[in-house]
Image: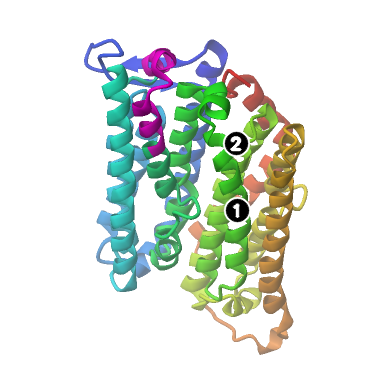
Amino acid sequence: MSEAISHGPLSHEFGGWAPPIGIEWVVDGLSGLLMVAISIVSLIALVHAGPLVEKELSDRVIPFYSLSLLLVAALGGMVLTGDLFNLFVFLEIGSLASYVLVGVAGGRSLHSAFRYLILGTIGASLYLLGVGYFYAETGTLNMADLAQRLPEVIDSRAVLTGLLFIVLGLAIKMGLFPLHGWLPDAYTYAPNSCTPLLTSVVTKVPLYAFVRIAFWIFGMTTVSTQIPILVVLGWVGAVAAIVGAYLAIWQENFKRMLAYSSVSSMGLFMLGFSLGTETGFAGGLFYVLADTLMKAALFGVAGAAIYQCGASTVTDLVRLRRNMPWVSAALLISALSMVGIPPTAGFFGKWHLVVGALEAEKYFAVAAILVSSMLTALYFFRMFQRVWAEPLQLVEPHVLETPFPIRISLGVLTFGIMALGLGSDLVMGLIFESVIPKGF
């Protein structure tokens, strides 16, 4: 990543064939930053999974780690590839690993995994159809070459149709409202050993693919004026941010509440990228990084609570006070960051989103960010009210000690949330200098 920042994008050709004929991997500011985030959070999530997988999947430990590593490799391939068809290949490899990880425990998770499989396959098929339209019109699949050829055929119906298919397919994959039907059940019933990895990075990479195609291949001018998909997606993101947070309020199951908060977060990401300003784009990317840490921490807390106390509902979390003080601290800091309380990473992400919306004079976006934050505060306040309402002496004690891998992983994630917030100026400076695409 440092080489890409210092000397510009780095590329590697496979098989001795130069692009656009051959396959190419590219590292630039955006892909390098996301690869660092995926690598770090995936490692922490797998450390956290150690004690949980021994308890949940004692007879499937090897398949669990094999599939997890396959998933991480596929996500890395999606981020690094410079070819639209190879992105599809890695998308499907990662999706297959995700489907199996969701359903590996059996029971209700199998139904969730099957639903995820059906909708995910529809999303991947739509993406592939879109790529086919692009290839039929331009004769290339290489992203850089496609960016050069598209201006000549930008008014073609085939290009418009292909872009529509790709956006719809990736929207399903990233769980963007109202195409999020697979997400709540998948996140709720997936094994606790899997959810920190699945929820923190899997939906972020299809979002990356959308950003890469929209801003690097088509360009800011095209997607904001000639084919104004950013206008539509801005409103979709605003609605998603509010509806996801509203639905989270009514959930009793803690993991399902967090699942709907993920729907809300995806709306905020899309809202930031659709603002059409450098600050909005940078704020959206910063909030993606923050949410990666926050979701890994929160679903890690959920898994630890079930592991030690059998606490799966919001009311059951009262048991954390007596038995898991360190986990309680991680829950508190992560929740404050989700709400947007300074100096956490979540606050600075939302701050830059609001500033970007004001620069763009899109006041509906400001309203959506503020309303979603208030609703987020409401469901987390409801949770903490239940946790602290019951006298501590009435809480049933448990003697099972929180395993060290869980404590250290949650500690690192919590530290990361605070460090990212306190170092937000440095990270935002890096994004402005090395990531922002041309055209803003």
The stretch in magenta equals: 144-164
Residue at 63% in and 27% down: 431
Query: In the shown orientation, is residue 213 left or right of residue 119?
Result: right
Asked whether residue 434 appears in the rendered view, the answer is yes
Residue at 45% in and 39% down: 39
Query: In the shown orientation, is residue 51 left or right of residue 358?
Result: left
Main SS, magenta residues? helix
Is residue 390 or residue 159 the one in the foreground? 159
Mark 2 residue type: Ser
Query: Which of the 4 image quarters holds residue 399?
Result: bottom right
Mark 1 residue type: Val
Q: Position of residue 177 (x, y in %)?
A: 50, 54
Q: Indicate which disc residue 274 carries.
A: 2
Q: Is residue 391 above or below residue 317?
A: below
Q: Which residue is mark 1?
A: 239
| 10 Å crowding of disc 1: few (<14), some (14-19), many (20+) | many
Is 157 magenta? The answer is yes
Secondary element at tag 1: helix
Is residue 348 or residue 231 the one in the foreground? 231
Q: Position of residue 125 (x, y in %)?
A: 28, 43
Asked whether residue 288 appears in the rendered view, the answer is no
Is 284 magenta? The answer is no
| 10 Å crowding of disc 2: few (<14), some (14-19), many (20+) | many
Query: In the shown orientation, is residue 42 left or right of residue 297?
Result: left
Colour setting: rainbow
